[in-house]
Amino acid sequence: MKKSFMIIMTYHLITISIPLILAYCASYILYRKNHIKRSLHIRLWNILILITFLVSAGAGLALLSLVEYGIALPISQNLLYWHVEFGIAIFWIAIFHMHSYWKYPQKQDSNESSSENEANNKKSAGNEGRKVD
């Protein structure tokens, strides 16, 4: 009878989540208090989402390739570990990303409508002294 063994891996949900949440809150507060520009705040988290995506996706593709071709390597467990760890990070950073852009289109629409109103007001201001039939 062939014995199989299962390697139990533990992941660090809390130890990844809390520092990321605190770091996002810190950069958000710095942005809201005008210590850093919004563009810097956004750029920082965009770079982090890119890095976490590349690592997690790269490890995932490597694991997929190994499984697809039936290759069992000792490194497979390490790839799985880092795939999950970076997956946890990308989850939080994706939430931060959505938060950063959640109200952005609404503000943009209000700016566009206010600029349209200003343009209409300027046009009508030029016609004040004229007689309209």
Image (tube, rainbow, N blue to C red):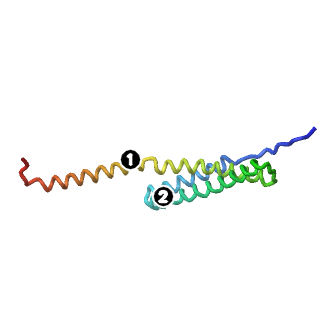
In the image, residue 88 lies at what x, y percent?
A: 64, 48
**Disc nearest the viewer among 2 and 1:** 1
| Count of marks placed on residues | 2
| Structural crowding at the residue carrying mark 1, measured as other residues with C-alpha within 10 Å and reported as few (<14), some (14–19) or many (≥20) | few
- Residue position marked by numbered label 1 in the rendering: 106
Q: Residue at x 81, y 53 (%)?
A: 73
Residue sitting at the far front? 69
Q: Residue furthest right?
A: 1
Within 10 Å of disc 2 (Cα), the crowding (few <14, some 14-19, many 20+) is: some
Mark carried by residue 22 = none
- Residues 39 and 35: in front is 39
Residue beneath the point at 58% across and 57% down: 50
Task: Give the amino acid type for the residue marked by disc 2 in the picture.
Answer: Leu
| Towards the viewer: 98 or 22 | 98
Q: Which residue is mark 2?
A: 30
Q: Amino acid at mark 1?
A: Gln
Query: Residue 99: x and y, percent?
Result: 49, 48
